[in-house]
Image: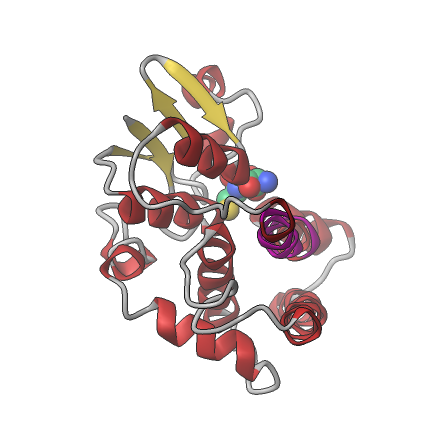
Amino acid sequence: MKLYTFFRSSASFRVRIALNYKGIAYDAVAVNLPKGEQAEPGFRAVNPQGLVPALEDNGRILSQSLAIIEYLDEAHPGPKLLPADPLERAYVRAFSQLVACEIHPLNNLRTLKYVKRTYKLDDEGVNNWYRHWIAEGFALMEAFLLNEGKHGRHVLRDQVTMADCCLVPQVFNAQRYNCDLAAYPTVMRIFDECMKFDSFIEAQPAKQPDAV
Ligand SMILES: N[C@@H](CCC(=O)N[C@@H](CS)C(=O)NCC(=O)O)C(=O)O
């Protein structure tokens, strides 16, 4: 199994956690995003979307982190990242999509580059954009957890699921931009619990071979 990844990519980080948690060995192939390697023909031949992560399993290429995690859960042994109960699966998917669809696209590299270039923002302007969407998104996550009342040490009670694989990288990203996360105590408690697991610790950006 081969994972095309970049150490700081939070979507790649989600899949690294899932692979580690399920005990699946993989080779990491680094795609340097700041250098633009995602747009080069070599990587476009792997994933025409020009996005990491991409996973190669038995010669087949998979894209999109949530689809990859669900595939790994369905096609490979190891502890389950999606619960069996349909309502609980919907809950885990809803939380995961809150991160992957409502927060991440507004703050990923190409979005930040576009707003910076088009609206002539300086670094402070870009940081304000970033922090605005983090504050909105984290408020949604915190409210979702409290309203649903299904969380425990993890998003779903005391069980590690795909939702935790999404929560942790998003917190890392927000911390990198010095966002104040004090207003989201439930999110942060779950983050702290997750970071007790080797599978999360080993997947973090600083531990990756391509980390600079
Ligand atoms: N929805 C996609 C998002 C993938 C994505 O945006 N990846 C970022 C890194 S986290 C990327 O490759 N960005 C390249 C770019 O913006 O040019 C997923 O969940 O896999």
* Residue 187 vertical placement versus 66 (above, below): below
Image point (70%, 54%), residue name = 102
Residue found at x 63% / y 55%:
91
Q: Quadrant of residue 64?
A: top right
**Closest to the observer: 202 or 37?**
202
Name the spot of residue 115 as percent of width and height, x first.
72, 53
2 up-or-down from 174: above or below: above
Residue 141 magenta-highlighted: no
Q: Is residue 135 something one can see in this rendering?
A: yes
Residue range in magenta is: 89-102
Q: Quick check: which quadrant has ligand 1?
A: top right
Q: Position of residue 129 (x, y in %)?
A: 70, 66
128 relative to 152 in the view: left or right: right
SS majority, magenta? helix
Report whether 191 appears left or right of 209. Answer: right
Task: Please tell me which residue lies in front, 21 or 177.
Answer: 21
What residue is drawn where x is 30% and y is 49%?
Answer: 21
